[in-house]
Amino acid sequence: MLNRFWFLILLLSLLSCDSKSETEEKIEQVEVNFELIRFDQEFAETTEKSLPELKSKYPFLFPKQYPDSVWVQKLNDSIQKEINTEINKAYPEFSEVTDELYSLFQHVKFYFSEFHAPKVITVTSEVDYKNKVIYTDDYLFISLDTYLGEEHEFYVGMQEYLKKNFSKDQIVPDAANEIARKYVPKADSRTFLAHMLYYGKLLYLKDLFIPFKTDAEKIGYSEKEIEWARANEDQIWRYFIENELIYDTDSELYTRFLYPAPFSKFYLQLDAESPARLGQYIGWNIIRSFMDKNDVSIQKMLNTSAEEIFNKANYKPRK
C-alpha cells in the first residue's frame, strides 16, 4: 500500500509538471510586439539646439506648463550628467531585460487576452524610488536611476530596506506588479484579511506573469528573508489568529505587516530578524491554497470576496 501511495504521488507530480510545461509551450507561441525606447540615452545626447526635435518626437514627456528653459537647465545640470553617465555604465544595452519583458508580456496576454504590450520607455527620475515603474495601458516607464545596484553611491544614506531592491533583477518583478494592479480590485473591506488578500492576489498574478523569477524576487525579499518567512509561517499565522487580527479593521496593521519597512512589527524580540510585509506573504499563500483547492478561473478568484476566499482556501501554514 505504501509503495502504491508514493507511486500515485509521483504520478500526480509528473502530471502537474507536464501540465505546466504544456502551458508554458502555449505561452511561448503568444505573439506580442512592443517598442523599447531608450529615452534616457536620447535625452543625454540632446543639446539646446536639438531639444525642439526631441520634444516633437516625445511631446507626452514634456508637459506644456514647463518652458524650454527648464529642460535646458536639466540638460546642463551636473547631477543629471552624472546620472546619465552612471546609467550608461550600468545599462549600455538592455537586451537581457528586454527579453524578460517580452516573456512577461506573453504571460500577461495569455491570461488576459485583451492585454496589449505597452511601449517601454527608459527614463531618469532623480532617484524617485516611489515611482520606479509607472504603467499605463500604452506605456511602461522604467526609471533606470533607481536600478543601479544597492551599493551605488547615489543611494548612500538611504534606508537598507529600500535600496536592497534597487537592482537590475527587480525591474521585471516591479513591472509585473504594476501591470497586476490593473487587474486586481481594491480590497473589499477595511479588514486586515481583505488587505492581506489584495496583496496576495497581486503576488499570485506575479506567479503567473513571471514564473521565471524566484519567490524572493517576486515579493522583493532577499533569499535569507524568504527562508525566514517559510521557516516561521506557522508562527506568523498563529500570531495573527491568537491576537484576533484577521478581521481587525485597525489601519495600523497595514503599516505593521503590509507596507515596506525595515521589519514586521509583532512587538516581540524576533521583530529585528523578520522581513517586512509578512502579511503580504501570508495573503499570497492563502490565495495559492484557494486556487489549489478550488476549480475557479483567475477572473473569478480576482472578483471573489476576501471572506469567501478565506473560508474556501482551507489554508494550513507550513510548519
Image (tube, grey):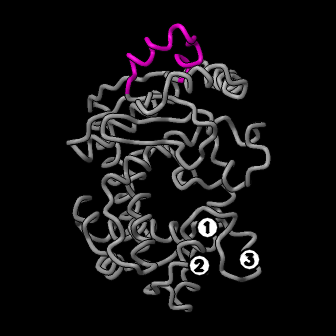
Q: Position of residue 113 (x, y in %)?
A: 21, 42
Of callouts 2 and 1, the N-terminal one: 1
Q: Looking at the rendering, in which quadrant would you find the C terminus?
A: bottom right
Residue that protrudes farthest toward the top in the picture? 49
Residue beneath disc 2? 236
Residue at horizontal 60%, vertical 74%? Answer: 256
152 vs 18: above or below = above
Q: Distance between the residues labelled 3 and 1?
A: 12 Å
Instruction: Give how far across and how far down residue 112 sits, in percent.
Output: 24, 46
In the rendered image, residue 52 lying in the magenta stretch gets the answer yes
Label 3 neighbourhood size at 10 Å, few (<14), some (14-19), many (20+)?
A: few
Q: Give the range drawn in magenta.
A: 40-59
**Distance from the alpha carbon under mark 2 to that under mark 3:** 11 Å
| Label 2, label 1: how far apart the Cα atoms are | 8 Å
| Quarter containing the N terminus | bottom left
**Magenta part mainly helix, strand or loop?**
helix
The x, y position of residue 85, in whole percent, is 69, 21
Q: Name the residue under label 3.
A: 270
Q: Is mark 1 on a helix, strand or loop?
A: helix
Badge 3 element: helix
Mark identifier at residue 229: 1
**Mark 3 or mark 1: whose residue is earlier in sequence:** 1
Q: Callout 2 environment at 10 Å: few (<14), some (14 to 19), or many (20+)?
A: some
Relative to 279, is 111 on the left or the right? Answer: left
The 10 Å Cα crowd at callout 1, few under 14, some 14 to 19, many 20 or more, is many
Tags 2 and 1 in contact by the CB under 8 Å rule?
yes
The residue lying at 44 percent from left, 50 percent from top is 177
Q: Which amino acid does label 3 sit on?
A: Leu
**Is residue 48 one of those drawn in magenta?**
yes
